[in-house]
Amino acid sequence: MKTWHYALMVFLGGCSLGILSTFVKLAYAAGYSMSEVTGSQVLVGTIIIWIVSFFIEKKKLHVLQTLKIVLAGIPMGLTGLLYYQSLQTLEASLAIICLFQFIWIGTLIEWIFYKKRPSSSKIISIVTLLSGSVLAAGFLGESIESISWQGATWGIFSAFTFSIFIFLSGVIDKEIPAIQKSVLLSTGGLLITFILFPPLFLVNLPTIVGIAPYGLILGVFGVVLPPLLFSIGMPHVGPGLGTILTASELPVAVIMSAIVLSEHISMHQWAGVALILGGIVVGNRKPSKS
């Protein structure tokens, strides 16, 4: 598989995550709580990936290998919990800007662990992406007094956990088949979610039936596809470029809000989407040989 194919995998993983916010809003509007939404998401997604794994050839793992990958899935579960928590007290436009800080955090992690200084084109890309995120999220109309700093804190924490998950996806047991690895990562996310928020909704049949469609969509695009696509692509593109590619999340979130929720998207928000896509292109440019 060519390098751009791996980059496309990571890009599509980011697109999958961008779909989530729209359906989370729909689930909240239908009266479901954060624990019900996140619980159904991780449960349905983990069940699906486990079923798929029965049809693939798997590599025999030691107990410590299995445990290590399961633990690596914890940041994935925490990201959803922290981000959805931030949405309780923060406007979605501000929450996604907080989450979007994973762009520079991922590059910083790469610098610290790989001693790989970001190139000038990557720095330009990050600045472009962050500028585009401010525009695309409609942040310009917000006043500083309206910001919930508690919500912003949860959002920033979600950016750190997401960056850690992206980093671990690319460095842990690269030789393990992607689906097998995704099964264990998803299981780790499920465990931490149910430990922090016990799935009490499972004893209520009407709630199970009502939340099921949201759980299916959120499970596929939030639990099944991202770890699978990241497991395939991240080892080949690295966490620095990987975080830039996953910036596709925000443009997809904006477009989905316009199409599904019929939200008005202003011209400066569309300009922000264009900036983000441009930043991804700049970040993928190979440095010229001197």
Image (cartoon, rainbow, N blue to C red):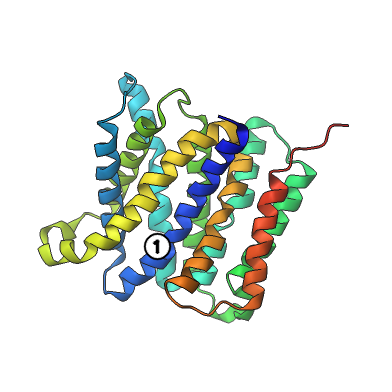
Please report the residue visible at 24 percent of the width from the left and 38 percent of the height from the top: 51
Q: Locate the N terminus and report the quarter of the image it occupies.
A: top right
Residue 253: x percent and y percent?
A: 50, 64
Choose between 287 and 103: the one closer to the eye: 287
Please report the residue visible at 65 percent of the width from the left and 67 percent of the height from the top: 272
Quarter where residue 56 is shown: top left
Choose between 107 and 235: the one closer to the eye: 235
Q: What element carries label 1?
A: helix
Residue 206: x percent and y percent?
A: 13, 67
Q: In this picture, is 234 found above or below 149?
A: above
Residue 91 visible in the shown view: no
Residue 26 visible in the shown view: yes
Q: Is residue 223 left or right of residue 93?
A: left
Q: Locate the C terminus and report the quarter of the image it occupies.
A: top right
Residue 210: x percent and y percent?
A: 20, 66
Q: In this picture, is 167 found above or below 193?
A: above
User: Around disc 1, counting alpha carbons within 10 Å, would you say few (fewer than 14), some (14 to 19), or many (20 or more)?
Assistant: many
The mark tally for this picture is: 1
Residue 222: x percent and y percent?
A: 39, 52
Q: Is residue 157 left or right of residue 266?
A: left
Q: Is residue 46 left or right of residue 74?
A: left
Please report the residue visible at 35 percent of the width from the left and 30 percent of the height from the top: 180
Please report the residue visible at 26 percent of the width from the left and 61 percent of the height from the top: 213
Choose between 190 and 48: the one closer to the eye: 48
Mark 1, residue position: 84
Quarter where residue 82 is shown: bottom left
What amino acid is at disc 1?
Answer: Tyr
